[in-house]
Image (cartoon, helix red, strand yellow):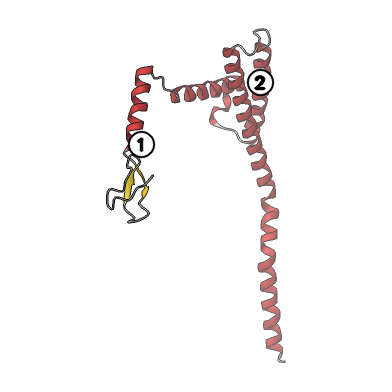
Amino acid sequence: MELGSLFFVLAVIMIVGVYLYAPFTKSARRAPHSRESHEVSALKAERDRVINSLQELDFDFQLGKIPAEDYPEQRTALLQKGAQVLSKLDELAPTASSANNPEARIEKAAAAKRADSSEKTVQFNDDELESMIAARRKEHKSKSAGFCPKCGQPFLVSDKFCPSCGKALK
């Protein structure tokens, strides 16, 4: 074997080794950044849990499930927990709104969720509901129920016989 071919084989082996080792060096450099992003993600999830708990607490209080003497204590505890989470979140990933009071930000987020959920509910009176049900039933009767097993033509729910070939359907 010639000396040149030996150097060529060694060079190819080194290039392949560097190529295979490169992903390990990239993950080592990204580890602190991904750890920080995981922590930010966990804090955001905790913030959402606190906001949802606060919203549920308000709803339960309005329904009378929570006594009036317990409600302020529970609400204050949730607001303090949310403020702590927001403070930690601001340390890791500062935002433009981080200058505000954390408890006020939690309160604002909970109020925004309540506003979103109240917009989705629509109130109907009994007459409107009855007319919607009648329209839905009428629409259902005019829908296709399937295909005739004999000729393959579509038929309606209200049909007793196939409109094309006359085969009994039911």
Disc 1 residue crowd, few under 14, some 14–19, many 20+, Cα 10 Å: some
Q: Secondary structure beneath disc 1? A: helix
The three-letter code of the residue at mark 2 reads Leu
Q: Residue drawn 31% across and 48% down?
A: 162
Q: Residue 32 vs residue 52: left or right? A: right
The numbered disc on residue 108 is: none
Q: Residue 140 vs residue 38: left or right? A: left
Q: Residue furthest left?
A: 164
Q: Residue drawn 68% across and 53% down?
A: 29
Can you tell which quarter of the image residue 80 is in?
Answer: top right
Q: Position of residue 170 (x, y in %)?
A: 39, 44
- Say which of 39 and 131 sits in front: 131
The three-letter code of the residue at mark 1 reads His
The residue wearing badge 2 is 78
Q: Position of residue 67 (x, y in %)?
A: 66, 9
Disc 2 residue crowd, few under 14, some 14–19, many 20+, Cα 10 Å: some
Can you tell which quarter of the image residue 144 is in?
Answer: top left
Q: Residue drawn 63% across and 38% down?
A: 41
Task: Determine the CA span between mark 1 and mark 2.
Answer: 49 Å
Q: Position of residue 142 (x, y in %)?
A: 31, 39
Above or below, comparing residue 145 to residue 124 in the picture: below
Would you say residue 116 is visible in this rendering?
yes
Marked residue nearer the N-terminal end (1 or 2): 2
Q: Secondary structure beneath disc 2? A: helix
Q: Residue 113 vs residue 7: left or right? A: left
The numbered disc on residue 140 is: 1
